[in-house]
Amino acid sequence: MDKKTATVDLSTEDKIKEAARKVFTSKGYAATRTRDIAEEAGINLALLNYYFRSKEKLFEIIMAEKMFKLFNVLAPVIDDPKTTLEKKVETIVVNYIDLLRENPDLPLFVLSEIRTNPQRFSEQLRVGPLLQNSALVKQLKEKRPDLNPLHFVITLLGMTVFPFIMKPVVFDALPNNAKVFDTQVQERKKLIPAWIKAILKAK
Amino acid sequence: MDKKTATVDLSTEDKIKEAARKVFTSKGYAATRTRDIAEEAGINLALLNYYFRSKEKLFEIIMAEKMFKLFNVLAPVIDDPKTTLEKKVETIVVNYIDLLRENPDLPLFVLSEIRTNPQRFSEQLRVGPLLQNSALVKQLKEKRPDLNPLHFVITLLGMTVFPFIMKPVVFDALPNNAKVFDTQVQERKKLIPAWIKAILKAK
DNA sequence: GTCTATAACCTGATAGAC
DNA sequence: GTCTATCAGGTTATAGAC
């Protein structure tokens, strides 16, 4: 079944959500007009308010979805005592790259909105506790007690996520962009775990 | 001389630019109202248009400044044949961290605006050629002909820039945030070059 | 150069017919 | 549930006095 047909088959409510996902993530909350969403969904402007009451309510629904996607790659892996540190790294890298290949502007969207309106997200963002006593941190402290776990996590995520953040700058200007980017990102599934290994080994 | 006094001493034009820098970078183009800038500058709304004709013209001036700051850390280093690869890495890391410590939301601001409105920046973004035949790339190919230079550059920049991009998510939720963040970032001036060294050595 | 007042436009949301 | 028409409020930009 092709995508166009699938989209048409959606309920009106889902058509609006689908359109909202697309427009919000590509332009951001402030630059998005409810009219853009309505047009993208192929429905009337009034229906947006009929189903979701307001632009802001609709946005909150989409945003919650996106943040869940983003954090849910980390959450189940980070506190699993049964897997090794190496395996955790590999899983995080592969899962994130697969997720972001399908949602390339997810990180920049979420980070931009948090920056634009930090107090709106102050409650959801309790990353400290999640890290503090996780299995990953314990395993890391055992292997390298001298290395601050936060440095490690940020470096790991930076290696994985940063290509997607830089995509508009580096790749969209390149001649053969889409293909080149995807190849590079796939390569990083193996490169990043190897690099992390080298970093942990070096003293 | 304290900052308040210095600000008051500025010409009206510079007061507006200074205010525009602050408001644009913290809220983004779309969410910024010219009234916010006028108020921040302590002047009347009409003066903004008198000096800069429009919100968009003013934005373009600020944005050009910011992009220059961001790319100018890389440009002089990347094609210098007189320094070693190691020295280049060290210089890039230290210079970027110093720049970003003073302009923490510079990367997220620039990247967000590029994403929101890619065609506006399509001309400025010719990163490919800049990299293609640079001294850095040559040195890298000599040391590790198997490693795609783009992987290297993105990893290096990711390690350096990503903490600033994650700041609102990870650190602003932490108890002792400002101090912790700054300490960590300073530590990375030494950590990142060491990590890069380990990565280049590992086969 | 700087201000007040206002024009011209845009955007989110709703009323009311079908 | 879905549409058209429209309102109410806000935003950029300018006219015109000083």
Image (cartoon, coloured by chain):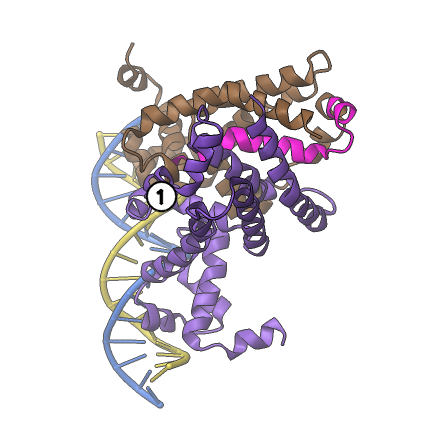
Chain colours: A brown, B purple, C yellow, D blue
Q: Which residues make up the magenta segment?
A: A139-168
Q: Where is residue B140 in the image (x, y as percent from the top left)?
A: 46, 34
Residue at 65% across, 17% down: A86
Quadrant including the C terminus of chain A: top right
- Where does the image place residue A117, in percent across and percent down from the top left? 53, 46
Q: Is residue A147 above or below residue B12?
A: above
- Determine whether C2 is above or below B202 in the image: below
Q: Quadrant of residue C4?
A: bottom left
Q: Quadrant of residue B128?
A: top left
Asked whether residue A161 is drawn in magenta, I would say yes
Which quadrant, please, contains the N terminus of chain A? Answer: top left
Residue visible at 66% across and 31% down? Answer: A152
Label 1, on which residue? B130
Q: Mark 1 lies on which chain?
A: B
The secondary structure that dominates the magenta segment is helix
Q: Tell me: D18 left or right of A139.
A: left
Question: In the rendered structure, which amino acid carries the disc numbered 1?
Answer: Leu
**In this rendering, does residue A12 appear at all?**
yes
Residue D2, above or below A173: above
On screen, residue A158 versus residue B46, left or right, reads: right
Q: Nearer the viewer, residue A173 or A50?
A: A173
Circle 1: is it few (<14), some (14-19), or many (20+) Cα within 10 Å? few
In-front residue for pair A162/B86: B86
Camera-side residue of B127 and A6: B127
User: At which x and y percent is residue B53?
Assistant: 30, 67
A34 falls in the magenta region: no
Q: Residue at x 78, y 30 (%)?
A: A145
Circle 1 SS class: helix
Does residue A13 show up? Answer: no
Left or right for A23, reference B27: left
Of A76 and C6, the residue lying toward us: A76
